């Protein structure tokens, strides 16, 4: 059996996603009309013998309660939110819920960062992981040499795919092959985390008895029960025939800023063409408006039949799009009103905002939203990356 765990972080993380994360936890921000984490959950659903999906984070439980109960019913797979009492790092968080994770005696644990956008090729990755026979397999991707230092950079054996060397966000270039934040482990990973926790506690105790000065610096340092998967686990295990890599040839992006979310929304919309074509609006559907490229329109939204929408547009619940409006590359959130003949391009229009008649809201981004976008959140209009 397989158990999936999605690390969703908490309100103190993801500050670069503001102002969009002020109204809704970042993992629930809609991309292609579905909460960010929904794309991970749908991907996990395709894993054979999946027993449970856990979301681990330090948001208030009530923020996820409605979503996890509705998605459990819809997909008929148990999805539970587990709240950490404090941030313990990606590995520390996983370890603190080991009893829940091991409840179904899984042979494999799938672990996903929430803030990545991917086609998540999990069934193929699982097959590769079983073939390698190691403790863990990392999804990896090639990126440009200039951007590689924002990620964990790694070196893998081209023949065996073994992870030979791993450095988290190095200052000097190591490799353009990077860690995607998508892993499959055997339960042995929990023992590896336990070992690191013990070492950290022993070191902290040693410092405590050795000198008062050292104690002072130790208290300022990372707490002894905070374990990061990348630095504390992956780096030391590289080159020990325990970790292997699986390279994705499909799309993969990080979602740290609002601009990145617009691009990722577009990637998921184009994936819908193959996975969920029923979610895409078609020009001759009941909405009647002219549709260009990939567009999602929530069933409760009202779009005037003379509006022209797309490509890469997603329109959330109860939005109203007036006559002659033109929307290109944008996310329109709940209860927004776009009035007659308004134009919205490369922008995110926040909850309950109104864009007046004949106005133009435009970010400077290209089609991939790589440059700045405009964000309209009442009562502000911001230009952001
Ligand atoms: N529950 C929980 N608790 N989640 C956490 C915690 C924690 O203490 N710390 C981080 N997370 C979650 C975040 O919400 C995010 O989804 C993910 O874990 C990674 O967060 P960061 O710690 O911010 O790391 P990063 O995104 O800068 O880098 C990691 O991911 C990259 C891929 O996107 C690293 O693993 C890199 O090596 C990797 O390239």
Image (tube, helix red, strand yellow):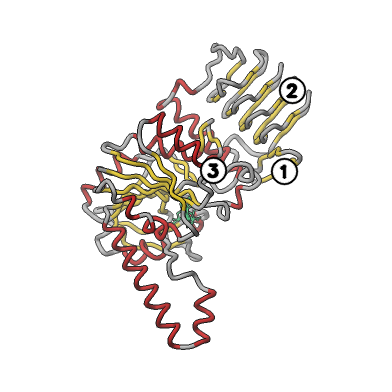
Image coordinates of residue 237 in percent, x first then y, are 31, 64
**Residue at the spot 55% in from the left edge and 44% down from the top edge:** 26
Quarter the N terminus occupies: top left
Q: Quadrant of residue 243?
A: bottom left
For residue 95, side relative to residue 319 (left or right): left
**Residue at the spot 27% in from the left edge and 54% down from the top edge:** 187
Q: Which badge, 1 or 2, comes first in the chain's sequence?
A: 2
Q: Residues within 10 Å of mark 2 (few under 14, many from 20)?
A: some
Q: Quadrant of residue 317?
A: top right
- Which residue is identified by label 2? 339
**Residue at the spot 71% in from the left edge and 25% down from the top edge:** 338
Q: Which badge, 3 or 2, comes first in the chain's sequence?
A: 3
- Which residue is identified by label 3? 63
Between circles 3 and 2, the one closer to the viewer is 3
Mark 2 CB near ligand 1 (8 Å cut)? no
Q: CA distance from mark 3 to mark 2?
A: 32 Å
**On residue 382, which mark appears?**
1
**Residue at the spot 38% in from the left edge and 30% down from the top edge:** 75
For residue 293, side relative to residue 343 (left or right): left
Image coordinates of residue 274 in percent, x first then y, are 41, 26
Q: Residue furthest bottom?
A: 211
- Work out whether 177 lies above or below 349: below
Q: Nearer the viewer, residue 141 or 274?
A: 274
- Work out whether 209 lies above or below 231: below
Image coordinates of residue 140 in percent, x first then y, are 38, 50
Q: CA distance from mark 1 to mark 2?
A: 20 Å
Q: Residues within 10 Å of mark 3 (few under 14, many from 20)?
A: few
Mark 1 CB near ligand 1 (8 Å cut)? no
**On residue 334, which mark appears?**
none
């Amino acid at each position: 059996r397989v158990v999936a765990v999605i690390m969703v972080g908490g309100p103190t993380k993801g500050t670069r996603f503001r102002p969009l994360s002020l109204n809704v936890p970042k993992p629930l921000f809609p991309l292609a009309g579905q909460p960010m984490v929904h794309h991970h959950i749908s991907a996990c659903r395709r894993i054979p013998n999946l027993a449970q999906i856990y979301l681990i984070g330090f948001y208030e439980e009530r923020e996820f309660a409605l979503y996890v109960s509705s998605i459990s019913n819809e997909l008929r797979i148990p999805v539970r939110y587990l709240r950490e009492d404090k941030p313990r790092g990606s590995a520390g968080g996983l370890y603190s819920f080991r009893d829940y994770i091991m409840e179904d005696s899984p042979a494999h644990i799938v672990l996903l960062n929430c803030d990545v956008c991917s086609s998540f090729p999990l069934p193929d990755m699982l097959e590769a992981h079983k073939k390698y026979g190691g403790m863990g397999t990392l999804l990896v991707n090639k990126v440009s040499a200039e951007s590689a230092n924002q990620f964990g950079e790694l070196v893998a054996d081209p023949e065996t795919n073994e992870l030979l060397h791993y450095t988290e966000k190095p200052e000097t270039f190591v490799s353009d092959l990077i860690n995607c934040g998508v892993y499959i482990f055997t339960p042995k990973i929990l023992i590896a985390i336990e070992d690191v926790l013990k070492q950290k506690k022993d070191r902290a105790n040693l410092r405590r008895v050795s000198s008062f000065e050292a104690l002072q610096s130790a208290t300022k340092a990372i707490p002894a029960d905070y374990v990061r998967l990348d630095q504390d686990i992956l780096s030391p295990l590289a080159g020990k025939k325990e970790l292997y890599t699986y390279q994705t040839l499909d799309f993969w992006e990080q979602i740290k800023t609002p601009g990145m979310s617009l691009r990722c929304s577009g990637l998921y919309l184009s994936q819908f063409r193959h996975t969920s074509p029923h979610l895409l609006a078609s020009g001759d559907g009941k909405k009647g408006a002219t549709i260009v490229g990939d567009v999602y329109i929530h069933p409760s939204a009202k779009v005037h039949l003379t509006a022209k929408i797309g490509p890469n547009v997603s329109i959330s619940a109860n939005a109203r799009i007036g006559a002659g409006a033109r929307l290109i590359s944008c996310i329109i959130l709940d209860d927004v009103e776009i009035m007659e003949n308004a134009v919205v391009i490369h922008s995110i229009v926040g909850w309950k905002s109104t864009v007046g008649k004949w106005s133009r809201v435009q970010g400077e981004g290209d089609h991939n939203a790589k440059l700045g976008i405009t964000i309209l959140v009442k009562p502000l209009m911001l230009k952001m990356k």
